[in-house]
Image (spheres, rainbow, N blue to C red):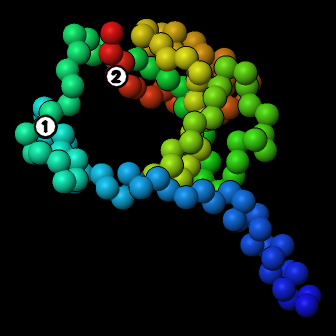
Amino acid sequence: MKFVITLSCLLFPLLAFTQAKPTYCDELPVTYEKGAWVTRGGDPRTKLPEFPTQPIKEYKIQVAILKFTSPADFAFHPKLVARYRPCEEVWVIESRESYRDRNDAEKLRKELEKSGYKGCYITELIGYY
């Protein structure tokens, strides 16, 4: 009886943080070709929709990646947000805002370093406007 209680106490925290991966994680195409997006069973000539937008480089500050820990267990800086990436099964802690100017991102990175986030760094992303 003690063994069952001990085992259930050890497994419960692991099961509480385990979330099922979405089905699209297993159905990702092997490669992405320019202008072509093929869904399973779809027409190979099907393309992604096109919009009259322009790609613009933006910057975010990334502070941590949590694999087996919930971000709810910590009190992070108010300029940060936690985003769950289901295919990788990780939480990414990053800046709420993205910045078009790298100097603005650098200012936030320095502010976060002064607050105690020693391992934060700038990541690049592409926004569309």
Asked whether, in this view, residue 100 is left or right of residue 120, the answer is left
Q: Nearer the viewer, mark 2 or mark 1?
A: 1
* Disc on res. 1: none
Taking depth in this image into account, of 45 and 115 the one nearest to the observer is 45
In the image, 52 versus 64, the foreground residue is 52
User: Upstream in the sequence, badge 2 or badge 1?
Assistant: 1
Total labels drawn:
2
Task: Tell me residue 26's x, y (percent).
Answer: 36, 58
Hey, what amino acid is under mark 2?
Answer: Ile
| Residue 104, position as x, y percentages in the image | 52, 9
- In this view, 69 is above or below 33: below
Q: Which residue is mark 2?
A: 126
Q: Residue furthest right?
A: 2
Q: Which mark is residue 46?
A: 1
Figure check: 123 above or below 19: above
What is the distance, in whole Å, between disc 2 and disc 1 at their CAs? 23 Å
Q: Is residue 78 left or right of residue 58?
A: right
Residue 51 appears in which quarter of the rendering?
top left
At 58% from the left and 30% from the top, the residue drawn is 94
